[in-house]
Amino acid sequence: MNDVISESQRPKGLAIFHIDTPLLLGLLALMGFGLMVLYSASGQSQAMMQAQLVRLGVALAVMIIFAQISPQTFKRWGLPLFVVGLLMLVAVLLVGEVGKGAQRWLNLGFIRFQPSEIMKIAVPLAIAWFISSHSLPPKLWRLLVGFVMCLIPTLLIAKQPDLGTALLIATSGIMVLFLAGMSWRLIALIATLISALLPVMWFFVMHEYQKRRVLTFLNPETDPLGAGYHIIQSKIAIGSGGLQGKGWLQGTQSQLEFLPERHTDFIFSVLSEEFGLMGVTVLISLYLFVIGRCLLIATRAQDNFSKLVAGSVTMTFFVYIFVNIGMVSGLLPVVGVPLPLISYGGTSMVTLLAAFGILMSIGTHKRMLAS
Amino acid sequence: MRRQREAIQDYAAEAQLFKRRALVAFSLVVLAFLLIFFNMYHLQVRSYYEYQTRSEGNRIKVVPVAPNRGLIYDRNGILLAENTPVHSLEIIPEQVRNLEETLTALAELIEISPEQKQSFLQDVRRQRRFHSIALKEQLTEQEVAILAVNQHRFPGVTLEARLSRTYPFGDLFTHAIGYIGRINSNDLQRLREQELAANYAASRNIGKIGLERYYEQLLHGTVGYQEVEVNNRGRVIRTLRSEPAISGKDLILSLDVGLQLTAQQALEGLRGAVVALDPRSGAVLALYSNPGYDPNLFVHGISSRDYNALLNSRDRPLINRVTQGIYAPASTIKPHLALAGLDRGFITPSHRIWDPGYYQLPNYSRRFRNWRRHGQGWVNVYGALIQSNDTYFYDMAVRMGIDTINDAMTAFGFGQRTGIDIHEESAAIMPSRGWKQARFNEPWFVGDTVSLGIGQSYWTATPLQLATTTAVLVNRGDAIVPQLLQASRLGEQLNPVEHQRHQAVTVQDANHWQVILDAMEQTISTPEGTAFRAFRNAAYTSGGKTGTAQVVSIAQDAEYDADALYERHRDNALYVGYAPAQDPTIVVAVVVENTGGGGSTAAPIARQLFDYYFSAGVNQ
């Protein structure tokens, strides 16, 4: 903590506006790269570019607004937001609107949105609030309560069904517990339990399409024209990119539309095809930089709540990246998770940057307090 | 104070704990990113060539390009089979704003039947949205004009011109040229067996019968290829490389349109066949079978109603009577028999018999009648041929015996395919002891031999065989293979066919040929000759032989009364002839079904052909 105190009393540069400059630069670099890839992936669609620019602008604004709010306010909001979100999730299951084969949308008359997006923020806030109200590491019963707080929304979202978001929300909750110091013995125990539960999940919980995704993942070549098509085409796109790539706008797999969902979930394949392993390395490095910066903010945070929230949000960001890249390159089954900051898409981008706003708030407000 | 210190210690421990956990988390992230990196390395560097190949395979498609089919000309360069543009109205659904409205508007301009509309809408559902789908095919010129003027009103609606086979002379050449039709599963099977399927990758049609089938390989040409880049739905984005198709060879036939028309007019309203060939080479000058049918019907797929009408017609228009019509040759084979009789010593030029009007086998009561009831009296080989005496040939045939007759007539080419360049050909029947045993499980009776003398009983021949065997006579022993093709042509390069000629009949005394040819010439030049009236005042010399074949046998002692007989039981009329008498350049065979005498019906038709042949200067 000494280094923080030894820093200048007055915040420098953008820190006045509660902006973390290195993090902002990292995010902007990723967005810039993302826009470049999207221009190619969208088939040079001006309309898509404009929509994405507007979305990025809105998301950045939300980030800046969130950065102005002090961590203490977030701590107070945590539980109410969680409860409201939970009620909405139940409402979705009862009266929600169907889109793309899943019941995810809630129509409030003036706005149509996915309550699961609220939960991406609410779950880490609420669990971190609950865990940090007592000293770390938390007692077993607190861990259990925290676990249940994470399990309920996860199951509700998985039931919509939206496996990708459920996975992210589970991650955000469990990461809080892990960072809070949950014992390794317990972790080992849970790991064992989960592997025992997997067959139960397979037979009683998972939907037919989810099972198919897993089977296709295990051997995509068995169904080259059906479910395996996406993975095969994606791997061809990535592999044929080689070391240097085919060049911007020159990817045949993407430009000739062999690649499915090329501007959303499979945008990484477009990047790999056109920019090759070199482009991939640049992207991964940028991500690693952002994650490293965020974890630094987390460790430097002043109180446990801030640390846990910052750490959890960062690790959720990481899971986004890993699941998406793992999915399109054939390491993981196909789960609908976008590549953060790169994929074309609205709601999740705003939620993501709101989370970065919270991180910036944590990173900058503690200095104000220290002064 | 102590509490406070504990709190501070707790705080420090908590910070330490979180730092450790964050470090573990960060290590996890680095590990995961390394995993991603190595997986990418594996895909993009180590497996690069595999994926590179698969990516190329994805985007590059090879599209075959159909060659233009060779054209067919007659000997004077008149087009007999051509490729004409046929216009069709096609629509690309993707480019049409409102399909239903467009269809309604189009229906106001040209007639579109409900069937056409229905089949179009069916195709729209089946095909890709960017594929052009035909709404109406074979547009008339008027329809093309109307649509061309209004085309600007209909985006996505196009007038497509495709080359389609057309036979401008309709039924005139059907039995020679045949027609092409859609490649069916049988054709495909055959192409695969001959390893030609690749060459037909872009072709829709194939020769079905006639020359179109026989010379399919010459006419078809060689398929070309276009290497194109396609997107995931198969839409062509651009052409990368192309190998043009090589057109098929044009065929130049020895047939003559004028001679063919003469044959058609002569057979108007009759069932029959006419064939004319050059005895020196075997080049076929005319080949016509009546009734015929329009081959253009078959090119775009004949309707089952039209096809059944052709198939079930009593006149059998689908049969090529020239090569598939099997007729008793009747007296037309008497010259051939006489030659064999002379050469093998059964008769001499001066040998004569007494004709009482009938022939009777020793110890048999049955009388084989001469067509001239009261007989001809003393008759030698000249008189027997000129007046077509039956009694003379009954007697000679019995003395020759079946084995000698079979041997001698087989040498002329009876009972065998002539080898003409179309596949639709019958060998007809030159009977023998073995043949009768196999066919009827009966021995050969001497009574069977009697009728062979006048080309009846089991003996049959096609009109083409009558022509080729007559060519052997005028060639004094040399046989030819009839050929419709004169030359094939690719660009400027002309490839004439080689005519085949070989000695088929050898004789002891070459003068015997002259005896037969003299008799045949006198058949038309002397007033007693059976073809004298048909060839009176001809501007050229010629020779020939008439034939009148019984279709049903007539009871002993009954009169042949043509009017009393059912039309299809009336006699067939036949004629074989050649001209000029010296060094003939044309041989004609004519068969007319159920019309009676060869001299009165068939010979005049042959004369019309000769008249045209000499006046128009065909083959000279």
Image (cartoon, coloured by chain):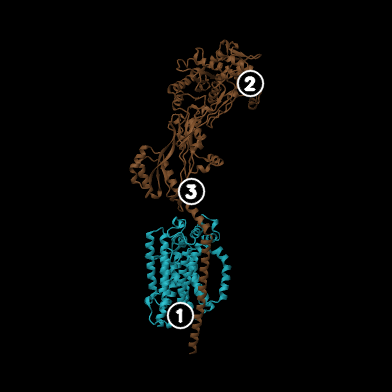
Disc 3 is placed on an element classified as strand
**Which dot marks residue B427?**
none
For marks 2 and 3 on the same chain, the one whose residue lies earlier in the sequence: 3
The tint chain B carries is brown
Packing grade of label 3 (10 A; few <14, some 14-19, many >=20) is some
Q: For the residues carrying marks 3 and 1, which lies nearer the camera in this image? A: 3
Chain assigned cyan:
A
Give the camera-side residue of A266 and B202. B202
Disc 2 is placed on an element classified as helix
Disc 1 is placed on an element classified as loop
In this view of the protein, can residue A332 be seen by the observer?
Answer: no
Give the camera-side residue of B152 and B37. B37
- Rounded to the nearest angstrom, the CA distance separating label 2 from label 1 is 127 Å
Q: Given the image, what chain letter belongs to the residue carrying mark 3?
A: B
Q: Is residue A351 above or below residue B171?
A: below
**Which dot marks residue A303?**
1
- Rounded to the nearest angstrom, the CA distance separating label 2 from label 3 is 64 Å
Q: For the residues carrying marks 2 and 1, which lies nearer the camera in this image? A: 2
- Residue B364, by quadrant, is top right
x, y (%) of residue B586?
A: 49, 23
| Residue lying at the far front of the rendered structure | B493
- The residue singled out by tag 3 in the image is B62
Identified by mark 1, the residue type is: Asp
Q: Given the image, what chain letter belongs to the residue carrying mark 1?
A: A
Packing grade of label 2 (10 A; few <14, some 14-19, many >=20) is some
Identified by mark 2, the residue type is: Thr
> Share a chain, discs 2 and 1?
no
**Which dot marks residue B404?**
2
